[in-house]
Image (cartoon, coloured by chain):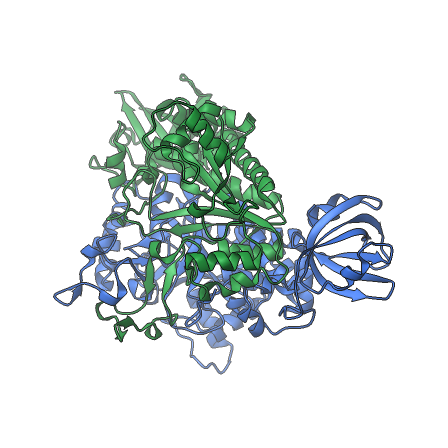
Chain colours: A blue, B green
């Protein structure tokens, strides 16, 4: 049976059979203790055995990492758990010798990245990847219970809202022998007969579905080909992109806030043990920070108000805040610490934001909103979309966006278009917030970064 | 408010405000009727308005497809619905002229594929894509409530369990100018410093996580580059790949059967109206077929028994059944019709199955299982995995699998490996089963097939 069900449903005196792995093994002459886990719960079960068991000597040879099957009776524990398992039979299912890299000691995260296929067996990564799974489900639960339709937008694409310079090219042609015509690639020889990429966003396709289902969300992998080695960049990551028809910027912020609180609440409730562990060993402020977020009301300020605040601070900034520019990491930090709360910053200068964002009446700013969160920085980025065909066409022409590829997208404005808004949330960024983990490589099962596509 | 909430919670006499689109509009001299939908539910709301409304003439000009906002009072309906909305105000939010391709008449599916960005506004695709969303959630719900961890296996990969000949290559290099050294591609110039692909399966990575969490599943996009134009092939599709430690082939079949019944049950319950529509307009046997599946017990036979049955049938087969070969479409059809039930076929000839499948004691067959379903054919393919290091290494050598790329995978057998099993289910194949839709292109929001990567 699963250890999770055992802890939920079993009581002292029950006969049980469990399968899992040895995390630790303390041997004494007459008896022994095994820290046993199976991964269905963060908790371990202590197994005790003594000389009365028929294969006592064999059991004593079982090392950390071995897969075993144990039958026995639950008895009162001497330790701090409710019960332990008095073994009647311990069967070796899979050997593990002393070369096993995951030993019961502290390993550096760098070392664990090199054995990414084994690191989910450590307590740290049992916690991180369980939180990842529970957070994903919490996101699905939130949107489904609020009448959203989950849409699988395509990954292979010719259109992209972020521009093709940051996208991976894909091909079925022989890379040693790419056919050229007049110095240009002859894509008629490729499977789709045109230049194709793996996507950086499902937003444009999501908008098409929002015009049919009113409320939709995507949740899938996304790619950026940038050659950037930082703690917050990976070439493959997962994104959530909700899109809502008949929704303005204020309502969008309501949704972002409501969704985030719901997800954090679910994780706190379902992953109590994991959060406790992460709070003890990764970030001592984690639990308090998460609990506070659920109870707080997020601050909402404009970009202008944010810059005012930064200028009035009297701080000696590395990057001088100004009304026409993006805000820097140091600014994000100051603002979230100043309010001691997540902060929505709205109405950004038009020239530093994307072409599809709604131009405000001032003609200078767009109805965009970034959510800045203490300790993480930008967690979500959203906007009201430009629904006016002429205004949007003018923006596209100004910015040189490839019109042919997004003809269909423009048509959405002609056929019963409406004011609508959406946001994107990087799932790994959320996980770093939920776990206290500081490097994105430790929030993804098998991270892909420049030069690293192992396993 | 969302129409779904209105139908759930509102009663005659309530004042409501709704936003959505015009599906149909019947005009009379003194009054008019609008079939109104917002996509949050399959049902439409009838809106009635008369001369008393201030902008009567403007409303009469609103065409099919227009986005509108309507305020009014719910009144008793003359038709077959519980109530209709007596409009006090109808505001035009987004125009739609008579060039709108989605008119209230029958369109061919081929035509609708050409306007894939608009087709979710038809009743057919409102049904199909809602079922898609609900089925996806049903799958997540099933696995999460049964203690599985959701794992995001990587899409960019160097290893693959299906072989790289069916995979798309990815690159950041200039396609016009691929650097060569001695006639070979110089991948040191590419982002990952090696040949990289987008994956055809997450199984191998899933196995690594099953050795840590016991029960895991993946649910994500998958790619095949094959140049194949059939009703059942797409180059991009979604797959579910559960992997379970301490699980043999019999237990795997229990899980497959239990999961499928749970998902079909959820869809029947949540998508009652959609299934009713699909049953009326796509496949008259749909509802009965789905209800029967939930109540049935799946048949389990071996490949040998299946071939015996086929040979004994006396049928004049296009492909003669034999004990060493795969079974053909015509055979699948015969078997599922013979039993009038889903059928598990187990213990397949080793030489026609994948290298990672567990070799049975006879040395000739492997512990593989395909689930054949009436009307669809193969819905799931699974196997017990070979957990014996030496046997697996021998298979790899025989079949010329790239050893270097799966070194780490082999190590899973050394470090506390155990008997374990898993299966893959193509999500679109499931959807075709759930909706009666016959072409995979109609089960995916924006399908990708050879020569087709529009939008």
Task: Please name the residue shown 32% across and 64% down the image.
Answer: A364
Along the viewing direction, whichever of A314 and B5 lies nearer the viewer: B5
Q: Is A375 on the left-hand or right-hand side of A320?
A: right
Position of B42 relative to A114 (above/below): above
Task: Please name the residue shown 37% across and 71% down the image.
Answer: B191
Q: Is B96 on the left-hand or right-hand side of A6?
A: left
Q: Please state the horizontal and vertical placement of residue A39, each as a whole percent of the image.
A: 65, 55
Please identify the quarter of the rendering in which residue A276 is found. Answer: bottom right
Q: Please state the horizontal and vertical placement of residue A133, each as a whole percent of the image.
A: 56, 53
Query: Residue lying furthest top in this view?
Result: B78
Q: How many marks?
A: 0
Q: Please state the horizontal and vertical placement of residue A16, each as a whole percent of the image.
A: 77, 45
Along the viewing direction, whichever of B425 and B5 lies nearer the viewer: B425
Q: Please state the horizontal and vertical placement of residue A223, each as a whole percent of the image.
A: 39, 61
Res A284 visible: no
On-image quarter of the N terminus of chain A: top right
Res A7 visible: yes
Along the viewing direction, whichever of A421 and A446 lies nearer the viewer: A446
């Amino acid at each position: 049976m699963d250890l999770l069900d055992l802890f939920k449903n079993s009581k002292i005196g029950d006969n049980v059979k469990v399968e899992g792995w040895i995390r630790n093994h303390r041997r004494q002459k007459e008896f022994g203790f095994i820290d046993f886990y199976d991964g269905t719960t963060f908790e371990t079960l202590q197994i005790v055995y003594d000389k009365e068991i028929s294969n006592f000597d064999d059991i004593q040879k079982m090392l950390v990492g071995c897969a075993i099957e144990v039958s026995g009776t639950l008895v009162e524990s001497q330790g701090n758990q409710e019960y332990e398992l008095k073994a009647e039979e311990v069967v070796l299912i899979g050997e593990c010798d002393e070369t096993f890299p995951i030993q019961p000691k502290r390993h550096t995260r760098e070392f664990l990245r090199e054995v990414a296929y084994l690191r989910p067996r450590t307590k740290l990564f049992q916690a991180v990847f369980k939180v990842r799974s529970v957070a994903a489900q919490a996101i699905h639960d939130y949107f489904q219970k609020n009448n959203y339709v989950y849409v699988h937008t395509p990954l292979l694409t010719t259109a992209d809202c972020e521009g093709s310079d940051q996208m991976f090219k894909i091909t079925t042609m022989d890379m040693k022998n790419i056919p050229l015509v007049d110095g240009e690639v002859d894509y008629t020889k490729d499977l789709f007969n045109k230049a194709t990429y793996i996507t950086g966003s499902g937003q444009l396709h999501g908008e098409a579905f929002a015009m049919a289902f009113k409320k939709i969300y995507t949740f899938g992998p996304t790619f950026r080909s940038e050659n950037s080695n930082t703690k917050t960049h990976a070439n493959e990551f997962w994104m959530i992109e909700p899109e809502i028809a008949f929704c303005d910027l204020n309502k969008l912020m309501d949704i972002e806030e409501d969704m985030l609180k719901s997800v954090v609440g679910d994780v706190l409730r379902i992953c109590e043990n994991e959060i406790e562990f992460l709070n003890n060993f990764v970030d001592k402020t984690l639990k308090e920070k998460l609990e506070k977020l659920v109870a707080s009301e997020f601050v909402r300020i404009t970009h202008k108000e944010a810059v005012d605040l930064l200028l009035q601070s009297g701080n000696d900034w590395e990057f001088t805040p100004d009304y026409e520019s993006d805000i820097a990491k140091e600014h994000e930090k100051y603002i979230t610490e100043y309010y001691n709360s997540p902060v929505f910053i709205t109405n950004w200068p038009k020239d530093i934001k994307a072409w599809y964002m709604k131009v405000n009446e001032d003609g200078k700013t767009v109805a965009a909103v970034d959510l800045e969160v203490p300790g993480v920085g930008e967690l979500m980025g959203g906007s009201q979309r430009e629904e006016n065909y002429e205004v949007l066409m003018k923006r596209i022409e100004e910015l040189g966006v490839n019109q042919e590829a997004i003809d269909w997208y423009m048509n959405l404005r002609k056929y019963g278009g409406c004011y609508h808004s959406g946001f994107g949330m990087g799932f790994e960024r959320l996980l770093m917030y939920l776990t206290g983990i500081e490097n994105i490589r430790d929030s993804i099962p098998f991270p892909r970064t420049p030069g690293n596509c192992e396993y």
